[in-house]
Image: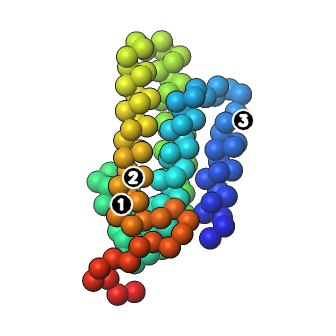
């Protein structure tokens, strides 16, 4: 259980220390919210009452993914997001494009975290019981 907390946090610490990436404040915010999403997904993956329902994520890792699948998806997505952010900056994309990317992805991921919480998925605690689900 402890590794579910430690792994995303260690990843963020390592990612924030990469001098070549020079992460912006918005990128660090997204990475933090994404780490919360990873923690929720790890907790839900071990609970037979919950199934991954996000369209793309479900096709990538399945309805009941293993911890390894969740971590691979989480780390891959985090790296991909940072690479796209850096590419937009390096290619000198218009400010509105960079702003849309930054705040659009922050909003989308924060909405996913809030929705998961509303559905009873907790980051590091016990998930709420699902009516009609017998463990």
Whole-number angstrom distance, CA of label 3 to CA of label 1: 33 Å
**Residue 118 lies in quadrant:** bottom left
Q: Which residue is mark 1?
A: 118
**Residue 107 at what x, y percent from top left?**
39, 38
Q: Which residue is mark 3?
A: 17
Task: Assign a secondary structure to mark 1.
Answer: helix
**Residue 86 at what x, y percent from top left?**
54, 25
Q: Farthest residue toward the bottom?
A: 134
Q: Point out the tag, 3 or 1, that comes first from the N-terminus.
A: 3
Quadrant the N terminus occupies: bottom right
Q: Point out the tag, 3 or 2, that comes first from the N-terminus.
A: 3
Task: Assign a secondary structure to mark 2.
Answer: helix
Residue at 34 percent of width and 64 percent of height: 119
Whole-number angstrom distance, CA of label 2 to CA of label 1: 6 Å
**Residue closest to the eye, 80 or 29:** 29
Residue at 31 percent of width and 61 percent of height: 53
**Residue closest to the eye, 40 or 75:** 40
Q: Is residue 109 above or below residue 7?
A: above
**Residue closest to the eye, 94 or 128:** 128
Q: Crowding at label 2, few (<14), some or many (≥20) Cα neighbours within 10 Å?
A: some
Q: Which residue is mark 2?
A: 114
Q: Crowding at label 1, few (<14), some or many (≥20) Cα neighbours within 10 Å?
A: few
- Colouring style: rainbow
């Amino acid at each position: 259980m402890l590794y579910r907390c430690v792994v995303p946090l260690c990843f963020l610490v390592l990612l924030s220390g990469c001098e070549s990436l020079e992460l912006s404040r918005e990128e660090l915010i997204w990475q933090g919210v994404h780490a919360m999403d990873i923690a929720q997904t790890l907790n839900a993956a071990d609970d037979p009452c919950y199934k991954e329902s996000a369209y793309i994520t479900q096709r990538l890792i399945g309805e009941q993914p293993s911890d390894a699948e969740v971590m691979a998806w989480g780390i891959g997505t985090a790296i991909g997001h940072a690479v796209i952010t850096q590419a937009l900056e390096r290619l000198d994309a218009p400010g509105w494009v960079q702003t849309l990317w930054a705040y659009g992805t922050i909003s989308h991921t924060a909405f996913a975290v809030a929705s998961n919480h509303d559905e009873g998925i907790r980051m590091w605690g016990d998930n709420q019981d699902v009516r009609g689900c017998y463990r």
